[in-house]
Image (cartoon, rainbow, N blue to C red):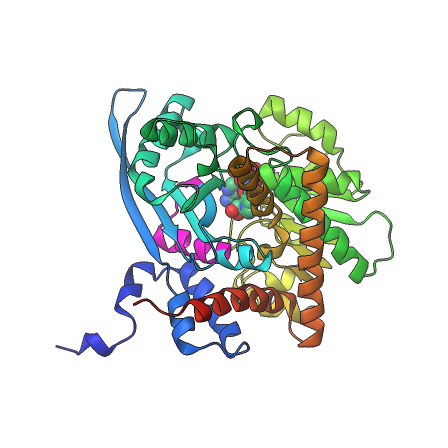
């Protein structure tokens, strides 16, 4: 038998999925630039803790079905871990672990006292009733209850989870302990200790960073054209604020397909349309466009705000934007990254572009712990200050070290966590 004890890490086998390997590759590529201590680098390549749970529920039709649930904590060197919960049909341990790792770099880049985590349930929320979603959420919360908490790990919304999901988690957790514990989750309804401005925070952050990028990339127009993939929490809010800032939204999509009008789409009318029709498709005075075509449109700003891995080596050379604002987590593979960089496209990497969500989640957690609540203006101003500083740090480092903006963002994010780990040492 081969001496497997000396071969490449035994523990990584469960994690060897394309997305996790991509997250590791991104870490490895900055490790040598930072001269990372090899021991610290090795520890950062894996999640600290990964829990897989069965989530059985009785469906509305009387059948019992078991779903797989995950909660992964990548690092806790700087504080409790923080990250969203996603309900999606094709998530797995590798993908959740990759997203937990990106959360670590994101929190660190924003200088928040958190590590990174992520969670999810493999299910199709589009075909589930509210009753089924409530059951699956409460059972999942019970199964992961021992590893979450305001001082340990604080979930938040992600794809197909929202304020209501967070309210059910908060209620389940609080029932177990016997008193209200709002700080266990962020992204809650304001009436339960949520923060004003949290729902809009991620899209607002994408907008603030995109407007900063427009100061660096001089365009010959006052109303840059924008294509947005995804019309959920991130995509819809980004589209609305960029529209209000004077941009022309020429295309937008959701899981059912996209719409295109080179003269621009009225976003406020689109919001009313989606409220009624539950999709952007069919919006008057637009042409149909696929989720693939939207990425390849001639536009000034492309904002992928739906799923990961949409920009790959297969389509990267067809991308024609000047600024790539990554609202989604991990929309660009490392192979695509090189091609896009060579095309001189200004990338706002996801750990910076979509960091507004976790930043206002941090504000929510602080408000919950202090039982002292802020006005929406205070929240928005504080967010703008923090995300603008992070943008400037990333931009200035990219110039100083002659690296792309993603590498600069990673160097800042990884560097701070590595330093905290070095200072704490390895227990025991
Ligand atoms: P959401 O569930 O509110 O919306 C997702 C949108 O994407 C919907 O319009 C959906 O129809 C569309 N979509 C789903 N699958 C698609 C596919 N295969 N192709 C094209 N469109 C598809 O989710 P969200 O909260 O807006 O999250 C979107 C992305 O932003 C995710 O990558 C998430 O991890 C990231 N993100 C979200 C937050 C947050 O605060 N919500 C924060 C940081 C990052």
Residue 255 can be seen, yes or no: no
Q: Could you say where residue 204 lies in the image, as x and y percent from the top left? A: 68, 43
At 46% across and 64% down in the image, what residue appears? 22
Residue toward you, 97 or 268:
97
> Where the C terminus falls, by quadrant?
bottom left
Q: Is residue 218 above or below residue 291?
A: below
Q: Is residue 242 above or below residue 76?
A: above
Q: Could you say where residue 409 lies in the image, as x and y percent from the top left? A: 60, 64
Magenta stretch: includes residue 422: no
Q: Is residue 24 above or below residue 240?
A: below
**Main SS of residues in magenta:** helix
At 50% across and 64% down in the image, what residue appears? 417
> Where the N terminus falls, by quadrant?
bottom left
Relative placement, left or right, of 340 versus 214 is: left
At 58% across and 59% down in the image, what residue appears? 109
Relative placement, left or right, of 229 versus 216 is: left
Residue toward you, 143 or 57:
143
Residue 177 can be seen, yes or no: yes
- In which image quadrant can residue 49 be found? bottom left
- In which image quadrant can residue 218 be found? bottom right
Q: Could you say where residue 291 lies in the image, as x and y percent from the top left? A: 58, 45
Report the image quarter containing ligand 1: top right
**Which residue sits furthest left?**
1
Q: Which residues are magenta?
A: 86-103
Q: Could you say where residue 423 lies in the image, as x and y percent from the top left? A: 46, 69
Number of numbered callouts drawn:
0
- In which image quadrant can residue 34 be found? bottom right
């Amino acid at each position: 038998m081969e001496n497997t004890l000396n071969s490449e890490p035994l523990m990584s086998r469960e994690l060897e999925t394309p997305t996790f390997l991509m997250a590791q590759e991104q870490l490895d590529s900055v490790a040598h630039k930072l001269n990372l201590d090899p021991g610290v680098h090795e520890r950062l390549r894996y999640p600290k803790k990964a829990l897989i749970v069965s989530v059985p529920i009785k469906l509305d039709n009387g059948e019992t079905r078991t779903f797989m649930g995950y909660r992964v904590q990548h690092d806790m060197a700087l504080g409790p871990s923080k990250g969203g919960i996603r309900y999606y049909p094709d998530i797995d341990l590798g993908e959740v672990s990759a997203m937990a790792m990106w959360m670590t770099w994101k929190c660190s880049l924003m200088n928040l006292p958190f590590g990174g985590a992520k969670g999810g349930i493999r299910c199709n929320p589009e075909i589930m009733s509210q009753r089924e979603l409530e059951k699956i959420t409460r059972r999942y919360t019970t199964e992961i209850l021992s590893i979450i908490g305001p001082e340990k790990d604080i979930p938040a919304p992600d794809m197909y989870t929202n304020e209501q999901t967070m309210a059910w988690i908060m209620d389940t957790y609080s029932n177990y302990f016997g008193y209200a514990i709002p700080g266990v989750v962020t992204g809650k309804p304001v009436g339960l200790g949520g923060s004003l401005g949290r729902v809009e925070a991620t899209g607002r952050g994408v907008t603030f960073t995109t407007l900063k990028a427009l100061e660096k990339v001089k365009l010959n127009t006052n109303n840059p054209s924008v294509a947005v993939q995804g019309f959920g929490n991130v995509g819809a809010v980004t589209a609305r604020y960029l529209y209000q800032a004077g941009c022309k939204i020429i295309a937008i999509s959701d899981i059912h397909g996209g719409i295109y009008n080179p003269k621009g789409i009225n976003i406020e009318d689109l919001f009313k349309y989606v409220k009624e029709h539950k999709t952007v498709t069919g919006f008057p005075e637009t042409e149909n466009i696929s989720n693939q075509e939207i990425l390849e449109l001639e536009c000034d700003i492309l904002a992928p705000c739906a799923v990961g891995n949409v920009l790959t080596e297969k389509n990267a050379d067809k991308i024609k934007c000047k600024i790539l604002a990554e609202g989604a987590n991990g929309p660009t593979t490392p192979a695509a990254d090189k091609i896009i960089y060579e095309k001189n496209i200004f990338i706002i990497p996801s750990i910076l572009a979509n960091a507004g969500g976790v930043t206002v989640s941090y504000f929510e957690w602080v408000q919950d712990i202090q039982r002292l609540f802020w006005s929406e203006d205070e929240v928005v101003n504080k967010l703008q200050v923090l995300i603008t500083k992070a943008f400037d740090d990333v931009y200035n480092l990219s110039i100083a070290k002659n690296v792309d903006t993603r590498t600069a963002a990673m160097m800042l994010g990884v560097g701070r966590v590595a330093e905290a780990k070095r200072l704490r040492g390895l227990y025991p």
